[in-house]
Image: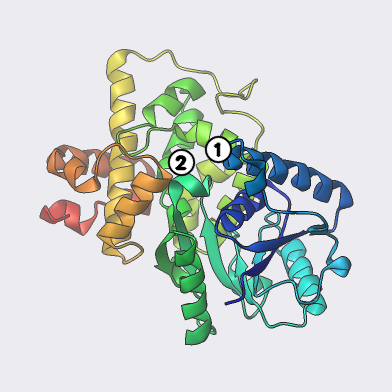
Amino acid sequence: MIRRAVIIGTGKMAGDIGACLLNRGWSLHWVSASEERLGAIERTVHRMMRRLALGSPELIPTLSNRFVLPEALDPDAASVVIESTREDTGVKREMVHRVLDRLKTDPLVLSNSSSILPAEIWAGALGLHFFFPIQLTELAELIIPPSIDEPRTTAATAFAQSLGLQLVIQDENHAFATNRLLLPLQAEAFRALQDGWSPEVVDTCSTSILLPIGQLTLIDSIGRPVFAAAVQRYVSCMPPSFRADYRPLIDGVCSPVNTPQAVGAPFPHNTPDAAATEALKARLQAIFINTCLRFVDDGLFTRDGLDLVLSRVFGAERPFAQVLDRLDRPRVIAELNRVYRETSADYSRPSPSLRSGGS
């Protein structure tokens, strides 16, 4: 494969993807419909490359004339096109078509979307969902639509592996499983907010050995509008009978309050004692462990794939098998049954492997 690529987009992930490719010797062009955004990404990429060069300016690649509008793109610029624009189907589709109309080649087209299926963007695209920062996570989800032939799948796999990435392979039914793994936990966190728990307490109780970052802090770091749009897409793809389970999450993220950084929350906050706080923590941890097991039971992850996601993306401090070995399964099942009685949420139904003692 000729090592020339076009990155569509100018945000944080577009810059990180570019830095990853530059470090592997790729020749790049960044494309945007905004000249102002092109100037911003050019400055960002130069800063990245100066840091990575570690005081050796001769190692910084020449990047002049590499930040262009679609119509100014070199027709021979790419064997790979990576779409990494904002999470808007119309914007993504338009930019990919503008770039492909300009190119003379038939490039491999990859979408970095975290919630929009690649076939919705372009019929020949695959999904390659990176995780920030790529240099540390070294992991991506490869989403293969049913219409994609084997040569393109092989090319996408080889490209990702050439960047040093380990892959979680997914079809469209299992797409974006890494982000979706958190949805039941996040739904229960927002249910606790509705019940009057303070954002600070809920955020702390949502942390664990498997998830060192609080879920409300995570949502703030992603950005409420981006997160809300993604959640709505994930939930819209669920069977109708399951969608009501996530109403507390959807209602919560669509309001401008209830995270540690937000102010003016509309719900009165409880002042819980230590026992109540521990009970909330146990409830949230039971939900997440059960979700992990159900994703493996349902084939969304292999056990190895789950461990990769937990460690590389979420920063788990211990392998999942070790957590299971120390788990008080009867207590977790009792907690899940309590949640189910209170909410009827399908995600609180205990995993078969939790009941059987399997892992």
Distance Cα–Cα, label 2 vs label 1: 9 Å
Nearer-the-camera pick, 327 or 1: 1
Comes first in the chain, label 2 or label 1: 2
Q: Report the amino acid beneath label 1.
A: Ile
For the C terminus, which image quadrant? bottom left
Pinpoint residue 240: horizontal percent, then vertical percent.
50, 63
Q: Is residue 105 visible?
A: yes
| Label of residue 186 in the image | 2
Is residue 262 rendered to the left or right of residue 240? right
Colour scheme of the picture: rainbow
Q: Residues within 10 Å of mark 2 (few under 14, many from 20)?
A: many
Q: Secondary structure at mark 2?
A: helix
Nearer-the-camera pick, 309 or 326: 309
At a point 61% along the width and 70% down the height, the residue shown is: 3
Which residue is under mark 1?
A: 219
For the N terminus, which image quadrant? bottom right
Q: Report the amino acid beneath label 2.
A: Gln
Q: Secondary structure at mark 1?
A: helix
Pinpoint residue 257: horizontal percent, then vertical percent.
62, 29
Is residue 221 rendered to the left or right of residue 243? right
At a point 38% along the width and 43% down the height, the residue shown is: 343
The answer to whether residue 272 is above or below residue 43 is above
Q: Which mark lies nearer to you, 2 or 1? A: 1
At a point 53% along the width and 46% down the height, the residue shown is: 132
| Label of residue 358 in the image | none
At a point 24% along the width and 46% down the height, the residue shown is: 320
